[in-house]
Amino acid sequence: MYGTYCRLNLNVSVSARAVIRASAQLIKVEARFARTTRAARHNFYRQMLDYHRGAQEMVRYWRL
């Protein structure tokens, strides 16, 4: 899933909302609004946000 986060091509300084918006574009339209895929979709968004948070922490630590 980290590869998926990298393919979002987002800057580390963008907000969490921008990460979710970019992630939503990767999901097919049928699955984006389906009730049956809601839990999987939320897990996907959480993973993307976790990777983004990790990237932000790395930048803060190394002062990049």
Image (cartoon, rainbow, N blue to C red):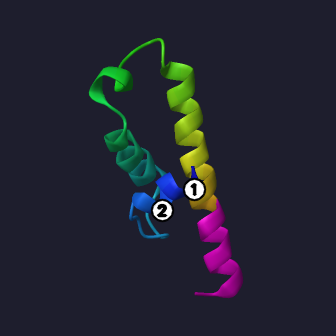
Residue type beneath disc 2:
Cys
How packed is label 2: few (under 14 Cα within 10 Å), some, or many (20 or more)?
Answer: few
Q: Quadrant of residue 21?
A: top left
x then y, percent, for residue 53: 62, 59
Q: Where 11 falls versus 50 (above or below)? A: below
Q: Where 7 falls versus 28 (above or below)? A: below
Q: Residue furthest bottom?
A: 63
Q: Which residues are magenta?
A: 54-64
x then y, percent, for residue 60: 65, 78
- Measuring 37% from the left and 35% from the top, which residue is drawn there? 27
Q: Is residue 42 located in the magenta-colored stretch of the structure?
A: no
CB-based contact (under 8 Å), mark 2 and mark 1: yes
x then y, percent, for residue 20: 43, 45
Q: Nearer the viewer, residue 30 or 53?
A: 30
Q: Is residue 55 located in the magenta-colored stretch of the structure?
A: yes
* Disc 2 target residue: 6
- Residue 38's label in the rendered image is none
Q: SS at mark 1?
A: helix
* Disc 1 target residue: 2
Q: Nearer the viewer, residue 63 or 29?
A: 29
x then y, percent, for residue 51: 60, 57
Residue type beneath disc 1:
Tyr
Q: Where 35 falls versus 42 (above or below)? A: above
